[in-house]
Amino acid sequence: MEAKRITPRWMNSLNEGEIFVFGSSLDGFHGEGLAYLAMRWGAVWGQGVGLQGQTYAIPAMFRTVEEIKPYVDEFLRFAKEHPELKFYVSEIGSGMAGFTPEEIAPLFKPSVDENIENVYLPESFAEII
């Protein structure tokens, strides 16, 4: 994966057209971690899926990676349909959800295989893929 498609390690601001992609609970309780940070850029309390302001929520609070996959697939479809936006994916599922990057990163492999140029991955995911 090209270095230019790596999510910055620290994000304090977003420019127009930039979207912060974060892991959420399905019911959208953004009370901690990166989900709480996402509220700064428009994440909506009570909305656990999809585009919200300059954020995109992917539910990750499940028992298995297989339960997360449909939401990642939907995100990748959305990203392909919106090439005018730049999506910075965080380490979804690696915090409170309790998954490892090794478990979650393969879900984002289509972004590399299909060269979805507006999807930026965390360095840990890119190293695995």
Image (cartoon, rainbow, N blue to C red):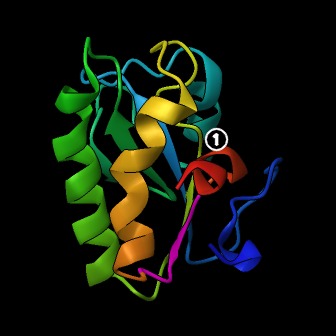
The answer to whether residue 41 is left or right of residue 97 is right
Q: Which is nearer the eye, 80 or 127?
A: 127
Magenta region, main secondary structure: loop
From the image, which quarter does the N terminus lie in?
Answer: bottom right
Answer few, some or many: residues within 10 Å of disc 1's Cα (few below 14, many 20 plus, some between 14 and 19): some
Depth order, front residue of 119/24: 119
Q: Quadrant of residue 39?
A: top right
Residue at (59, 15) in percent of width and height: 32
Q: Is residue 76 magenta?
A: no
Residue in the image at 30% along x and 79% along y: 80
x 61%, y 30%: residue: 34
**Circle 1 SS class:** helix
**Residue 35's spot in the image, x, y percent?**
53, 29
Q: Quadrant of residue 91?
A: top right
Residue 44 point in image, percent of width and height: 40, 37
- Is residue 43 visible in the rendered image? The answer is no
Left or right side of 110 for 89: right
| First to last magenta residue range | 116-121
Q: Is residue 85 visible in this depiction of the protein?
A: yes
Q: Image height check: is 97 above or below 102? A: above
Name the foreground residue: 45 vs 58: 58
Q: Which residue is mark 1?
A: 40
| Vertical arrangement, residue 56 with respect to residue 33, above or below | below
**Picture coordinates of residue 40 (x, y %)?**
64, 41
Residue 7 vertical position relative to residue 107 in the rendered view, above or below: below
Q: Amino acid at mark 1?
A: Arg
Nearest the viewer among 46 and 105 is 105
Q: Is residue 74 left or right of residue 58?
A: left
- What residue occupies the far bottom of the structure in this picture? 84
On the image, the x and y values in percent for residue 75 come to 29, 58
| Relative side of 51 to 27, left or right | right
